[in-house]
Image (cartoon, rainbow, N blue to C red):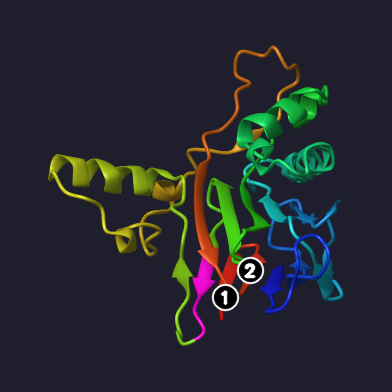
Amino acid sequence: MTAALIDEYAPYTRAIAHACAITFKGNARNNLQQDAFFFLDHWYQEDLGVMAVTSVQAPFCLAVSDGVASSNQSQHCSKAVVKAIKALWDDKQANVQNMTSDRMYQQLSQTKHAKKRYGAAATLAMIVGTLKDDNSININIRHVGDSRVYKLGKYENEWQCLTRDHNLLNELVDEQAKDEDRQVEFTEYNRTGMAGSLYSITECFALAVNSDDPSSEPPNSTKQTFTCNRAIVSLSVLTVFMT
């Protein structure tokens, strides 16, 4: 999913970006699409498709929720997450501070889910773009689990990952750096080629049968903000191309 920021705009009147979405079904063991996404003003869960390029005004929101394949019901959790984003976006569009994992989980908890869906889990990568007084673009990133945000600069030839996966491996990296009394280099995160069990997700959204279930609690999310003049932002993997 991409949003390309352009040069000439005025707040809420001209387009500041162009957005499109590309989706495909992965290799989930139930052979169903376990991913869902929020695209500007509505949620979708499609097996395969490319949406038309769409003009974007400020503020805008793009998000992807990836169902955790350990459950055969995770497509319902990812769909519930993006539906929660739509509810918050429709209700509080002018206040991006309301787009938090806690508020999303409150929305999830308002629905009683079937027992067979208990424990179904999903991750999240989300950006909210707003226009600043100096006509630069403020990008708020929030992510849960191992859905990632990447940036690619205009004169760069490699993707730069902006998010740290919430998984066991990265927790071990943090612990080792703490023991060695040093700061973690970001390149130490999100490593590949290690034992599969180390990639176990430590934070995710999960469905509970009842909202008062003691195991029902919102996941910890990571938030960060950066400013750009022009960019392309894509989700799925959510990627920001600086131009």
Residue 45's spot in the image, x, y percent? 83, 55
The reply, left or right, for residue 45 in relation to residue 60 is right
In the image shown, does 241 or 95 lie closer to the viewer? 95
Q: Quadrant of the N terminus?
A: bottom right
Quadrant (top left/top right/bottom left/bottom right) for the C terminus: bottom right
Crowd class of label 2 (few under 14; some 14 to 19; many from 20; radius 10 Å)? many
Q: Earlier in the sequence, mark 2 or mark 1?
A: 2
x, y percent for residue 181: 13, 43
* Pointer 1 local density, CA inside 10 Å: few below 14, some 14–19, many at least 20: many
Q: Residue at x 44, y 50 (%)?
A: 199
Which residue is outermost to the left?
Answer: 180
- The residue that disc 1 covers is 241
User: Three-letter amino acid code at disc 1?
Assistant: Phe
Nearer to us in this view, 16 or 143: 16
Front residue of 178/58: it is 58
Q: Which residues are magenta?
A: 150-154
Q: Is residue 59 above or below residue 200?
A: below
The three-letter code of the residue at mark 2 reads: Val
Mark 2 element type? strand
Disc 2 vs disc 1: Cβ atoms closer than 8 Å? yes
Residue 152 magenta-highlighted: yes
> Is residue 31 positioned above or below 109 on the image?
below
* x 52%, y 67%: residue: 150
Which residue is disc 2 drawn over?
Answer: 233
Q: Quadrant of residue 120?
A: top right
Mark 1: secondary structure: strand
- Disc 2 to disc 1, how far (Cα)? 6 Å
- Residue 98 as seen in the image, left or right of residue 116: left
Q: Which residue is pictured at 45% across the width and 84% down the height? A: 156
